[in-house]
Amino acid sequence: MRSVGRSVPRREGLAKARGTARYVDDLRFPGMLHGRTIRATIPAGEIAALHLDFDRAGFTLVDHRDIPGRNVVALIEDDQPYLVEREVRHAEEPVLLLAHEDRDTLRAAEVRLEYRPGAAVLDPERSTRVFKELSIEKGDLAHGFAEADLVVEGEYRTGRQEHVYIEPNGVIAVPAADGVTVYGSLQCPYYVHKALVGLLGLPHEKVRVVQTETGGGFGGKEDYPSIIAGHAALLAVKSGRPVKLVYDRLEDMAATTKRHPSLVRHRTGVTRDGRITAMEIDVLLDGGAYCTLSPVVLSRGCLHATGPYRCDNVRVHGRVVMTNTPPCGAFRGFGAPQTVFAAEAHVDRVAEALGLDPVAFRERNALVPGDTMATGQVLGEDATALAVLREAVKRSDFRRKRRAWRGTNRGIGLSLFFHGAGFTGSGEVMLASRAALELVPRGVRILVASTEMGQGARTTLAQIVAETMGLPLDRVLVATPDTASVPDSGPTVASRTCMVVGGLLKACAEELLEKLGGLTPSAYLRRHGPLRVTRQYEPPPGALWDDATYKGNAYATYGWGCDVVEVELDPVTYEVRPTRVTAVVEIGRAVNPLMVAGQVEGATAQGLGYALLEEVVMREGRMANAQLTNYLVPTTLDTPPIDVTILESPCRQGPFGAKGVGEMPMSGPGPAVANAVLHLGLDVRSLPITPEKVLECVSSSTESERTSWRRR
Amino acid sequence: MRFVLNGKRTDVLAPPLKRLLDVLREDCGLAGTKEGCGEGECGACTVLLDGAPVNSCLVPLAHVRGRKVTTIEGLRSRVPEALAREGGTQCGICTPGVVMAAAALGPKPNAARVREALAGNLCRCTGYAGIVRALAGPRAAPHPRVRAAGATIARKRKAPGDSRTHRRGRTTTTRQG
């Protein structure tokens, strides 16, 4: 029976829906303590004194002097300490760790910190500390502008966004014979493993990281778990007992990473008939207090900053800078939702300046197979920007609604977007991921560190192996991601799992099938004993990338998408409400169409939240609305029906032609909403589009426009 | 404190102001009820109190004295199967709460009724489409359409066990030339 292309139910779906799936907070160990993090409360300065105003009986305390290895969170730069030694760089910075077996006693413990306050930099435009700066250049910009009949400029902003996975960050660290095992809600077991080895100064084999069922990640459990796992491990090593460290919602929202705020400036040259001749783009991201993954977020952001358009003369310049705020990190889309918002909002404004229809203008400039991107990458036959655009326009009846709704309180807008699948540039080569497949009496077992966090990896990878080997799906088992027993297949990020890890598993399955020589797995095991095959990532021939010049193939391939969002403006409250979304994605091959749709629907809702509701309010370098009461994410009533069409244009890089899908649909809703609002006559250029921003814009609109919104 | 838990008389020795959520998870060993926010916003901890859905993080133990509490472990329902089949559960942490809130819905609810009843249950994964599909039927929230990007006419590709029933008509999508 075929497996690929079928919407088989997710493997652990029933266990989750019946409440029997076990998440980290559901686990208990004998003698377990609870952990707590004492944090700084000022954005910049030094710790002058620390007072413990509680009875220390039964408490385990850990500060930076208890760290056996290095006091740095191993990621890109070694700049972030696990625990403050002296200097405070943001207001949620961990200073001291406590553990106690009784949670109430633990919560009641009072710690007072005295500081020598320093000057905080909170505005990224004023920051002089640059984590990463880069340029992408193509052609001759001056020539491009000289060729133009019209130059259109625009400035676009986006705010921080919180992941709001419904399960907060949490781990349990269990001391083992001269080592430690960490169970946790996390995306990347080997990232945590690497961080713990450095922190604890232990040999690799003495540190074990096991993923527990994970209640959502969205990037928020990519880099942060290295910190919380380190804290729990320090407490466990010192106390000699298991320690559970699970954040409550407030701490999770206040202290963990966010999507980088952005300011993107566009200067675009166009001919009168609508050809783009020059694109000059400046990207500024606020990285927060430490580097984390910011350089790579900036890279991906800049590589998507032109939008899916052809242009011979391009300069993209990007910077990510330090501010005294909690560090920003990975979030679904990884820099692209910010720059795609700017590009797609700008495209509608350029079209308007030219008096052109936004669809016609996009059709004129959209990338097609054989076109060259800003990095010099030549697009393959699977580039389908025009196909998704035309399908979405037709499916949504865009042109008719656009005409009919003009001058009413209804608006319709679209966005055309793309997303590189897999790690950026030479990332996959450096990762050199490994995946393995072994025989078990029942069939085969997948051994990868790629995690299931709701996206469907467990089911999808099994489908790829079952299809390749001609096995029924239930004969393919998937091992728990546990660094003691699975190879490092890389982090579960960057829309890479299905395409890259799935590709490795397909190769493993082909090799295993050949080695079986027609025997069933159980017969082979009886006759020849255990069998396991491992495959390591090898770059496709000709895939060249230069990190110094940003030239070459930035990604193996790209997914393509087009969103049409319909909105209604409430003329009294100035709320913009989405009423319908038409989402068209081209992702190579849908291994499991319902799972693909789940990614599109979920990311679209998250994108609508980003566009309209989700506003992180910062005061004195801290999140002032760190609770779900006033950081609003879309409910059932805020989320309109989402009509999903999946187009398939198989690529040669992915298994059965599959490309990545998880992140891409996050980029579409922001600009489509802004363009629908522009259709209402309101030019709002920053996300989220809150009633306050609409009000500000309305104040500068004409009386006839205001009257028109009251008409239906 | 005495109350009826999943149909059985129960006596729990715990402080009267302890959150019902913690009593269920820690004192009764029922970990199917999840904590998402602790402030009554997300609905992951939804249980039934005398048949009506409540956020158990906001209910002190004293409040349930002599009353009936039903958790996911004690609920007989077909909703879990429907959610698993229709993509209504992804990461799953909100799902037991969704199942409990759905238990208070009558038979065959329409999409509007489902959305209203579940307005207190946050799901960050599904965009609610799979949940609405599971509870109100695929007509309310259709399955995705799958088509070849290059085809001018969609070919019907039928796979055994495939639940997609929505491919109809033609597509005029063309591959750019």
Image (cartoon, grey):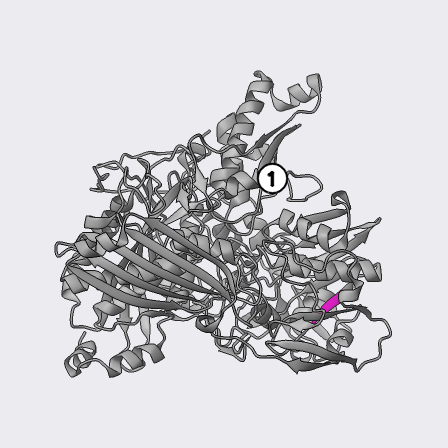
Disc 1 marks a residue whose amino acid type is: Val
Residue A551, x across and y down, in percent: 40, 44
**Quadrant placement of the C terminus of chain A:** bottom left
Instruction: Work out whether residue B98 or residue B78 is closer to the camera in this orientation and state it.
Output: B98
Instruction: Work out whether residue B67 or residue A679 is closer to the camera in this orientation and state it.
Output: A679
Q: In the image, A133: left or right of A186?
A: left
Q: Quadrant of residue A279?
A: bottom left
Residue A36 within the segment the image draws in magenta: yes
Instruction: Work out whether residue B60 or residue A656 is closer to the camera in this orientation and state it.
Output: A656
Subunit that carries the residue with mark 1: A
Q: In the image, A187: left or right of A689?
A: right
Residue A219 within the segment the image draws in magenta: no
Numbered range of the magenta stretch: A34-38
- The secondary element bearing badge 1 is classed as loop
Q: Which residue lies under the disc numbered 1?
A: A448
Q: In the image, A616: left or right of B55?
A: left
